[in-house]
Image: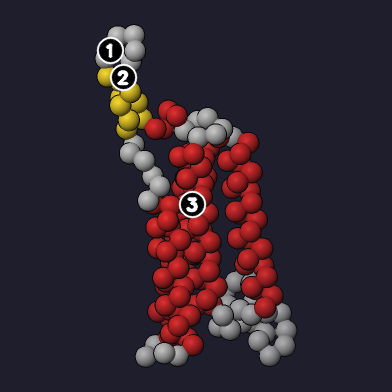
Amino acid sequence: MSKRTWMLCAALAVGPCLVSGYAQTFEPAARLHESAVSGAVIASSSRAESGTRGSRESWLWVHSGVAVQLAGTFSDWATSWKQPEGNQLLAQSGGAYAGRFYREGTVRKFGLAAGISTMSYLVAWKWPRARRVVGIFNVSMGASFAAAAVHNAIVNPYYRP
């Protein structure tokens, strides 16, 4: 297996591996609680309980979202390495790899990923009710990075057999 094929396989395989550990810890969306006063069974969704600062299941939104965002960032990085870069912010400014995604772009890309992850945890800690929105935002960021990775793999002759 060539180095290029290995990098693509690793990039596409890392996402499900990271998220599968979190998927097993989700509890059912609705729980039944018996009321001691009336004896009635009241269904309450876990969404009502997720607003508390210590609620474990509300943090799962944030953890899962950050994991998907980081997996998408990694897959985009792996498929962009040493390839022509359309985003001038990520392109190498000079040298043998000028105009390509190389060391400068790597530092900027992982700096962006670290910044988004840090801000996600800070927002989720400060505003507990926003944890679901933060998780959905991070999943959408990860999906956009994964779409860029798939585009890189399709367009790039480096990954063709």
Q: Residue furthest right?
A: 94
Q: Is residue 155 visible?
A: yes
What SS does tag 2 mark? strand
User: Dot 3 surroundings within 10 Å: few (below 14), some, or many (20 or more)?
Assistant: many
**Disc marking residue 65:** 3
* x 65%, y 87%: residue: 97
> Does 15 sit left or right of 123 as displayed?
left
Question: Which residue is at 49% across, 71% downward?
Answer: 75
Q: Which quadrant of the figure contains the C terminus?
A: bottom left
For badge 1, the amino acid type reads Gly
Q: Measuring 59% from the left and 47% from the top, which residue is drawn there?
A: 120
Query: CB of mark 3 within 8 Å of CB of mark 1?
Result: no
- Tell which circle, 3 or 1, labels the residue nearer the N-terminal end: 1
Residue carrying label 2:
34
Distance between mark 3 and mark 1 Cα atoms? 39 Å
Q: Position of residue 28 (x, y in %)?
A: 33, 39
Give the labeled residue for mark 1: 39
Q: CA distance from mark 3 to mark 2?
A: 33 Å
Q: Is residue 129 left or right of residue 99?
A: left
Disc on the earlier residue, 2 or 1: 2
Label placed on residue 59? none
> Relative to residue 93, is residue 71 depicted above or below?
above
Figure quadrant of residue 116: bottom right
Of 79 and 2, the residue lying toward us: 2
In front of the other: 136 or 93: 136
Q: Amino acid at mark 2?
A: Glu
Q: Which residue appears at 60% of the width and 53% of the height?
A: 117
Q: Give neighbour class at mark 2: few <14, some 14-19, many 20+ (Cα, 10 Å).
A: few
The count of marks equals 3
- Residue 144, image x, y percentages: 47, 61
Residue 121 pos. (x, y %): 60, 46
